[in-house]
Amino acid sequence: MQIAIDEARDGINKSHGGPFGTAIVKDGVLVASGHNRVLCNNDPTCHGEVDAIRKACSKLGTFDLSGCELYTTGEPCHMCLCACMWANISKIYYGCTIQDNGLIGFRDDKFDQIFGGRDKLEGYMTELDRAACLQLFDDYVKLKPQKY
């Protein structure tokens, strides 16, 4: 999770987007990491998970990330959750919750209310290092970032 936090810090310090960093690991080895690049790429789909998935697929030369685990600072939105499933990510570990994402200005909870279904994913996602990720979120808010 520390790699994901470091990625997120890099991104927010460069004003690339929100405090969302991601690391993808296979067999205990880092495959790729990424962070939210919505603002710098003018791409609403370039969340941290998507950035890391794109890099991991490129590095491994495949669209199939079976056996990989994903660590991310914020619980994945529905778009990222589906991207993880399409990529065959085996397990997701997240720091802050969907509700935490909402407290710092992100609309994930809105889409969660529309699409729901997280209750069907028992065991697929696990909360990890929430306190460290909440500190990251607090640091992000102090920067008075551009809202989107």
Image: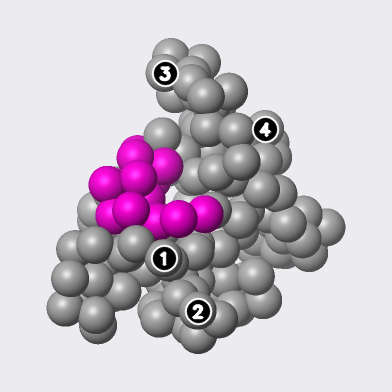
Which badge, 3 or 2, is on the more N-terminal residue?
2
Q: Which amino acid is tagged 1? A: Gly
In front: mark 3 or mark 2?
2
* Disc 3 and disc 4 in contact, CB within 8 angstroms: no
Q: Residues within 10 Å of mark 2 (few under 14, many from 20)?
A: few
* As drawn, 53 above or below 3: above
In front: mark 3 or mark 4?
3
**90 or 102, nearer to the observer:** 90
Q: Which amino acid is tagged 4? A: Gln
Q: Is residue 89 magenta?
A: yes
Mark-to-mark CA distance, 2 and 4: 31 Å
Picture disc at residue 115: 3
Q: Position of residue 15 (x, y in %)?
A: 46, 68
Which badge, 1 or 3, is on the more N-terminal residue?
1
* Disc 1 and disc 2 in contact, CB within 8 angstroms: yes
Q: Which residue does the image show at 65% across and 70% down from the upper left?
A: 1
The answer to whether residue 126 is left or right of residue 14 is right
Q: Which residue is mark 1?
A: 67
Which badge, 1 or 4, is on the more N-terminal residue?
1
Which badge, 1 or 2, is on the more N-terminal residue?
2
Mark-to-mark CA distance, 3 and 2: 32 Å
Q: Which residue does the image show at 24% across and 80% down from the upper left?
A: 60
Q: Position of residue 117 (x, y in %)?
A: 48, 21
Q: Is residue 66 visible?
A: yes
Q: Which residue does the image show at 57% across and 71% down from the upper left?
A: 4
Picture disc at residue 27: 2
Mark-to-mark CA distance, 3 and 4: 15 Å
Which badge, 3 or 4, is on the more N-terminal residue?
4
Which stretch did the figure color magenta? Answer: 79-91
Q: Which amino acid is tagged 2? A: Asp
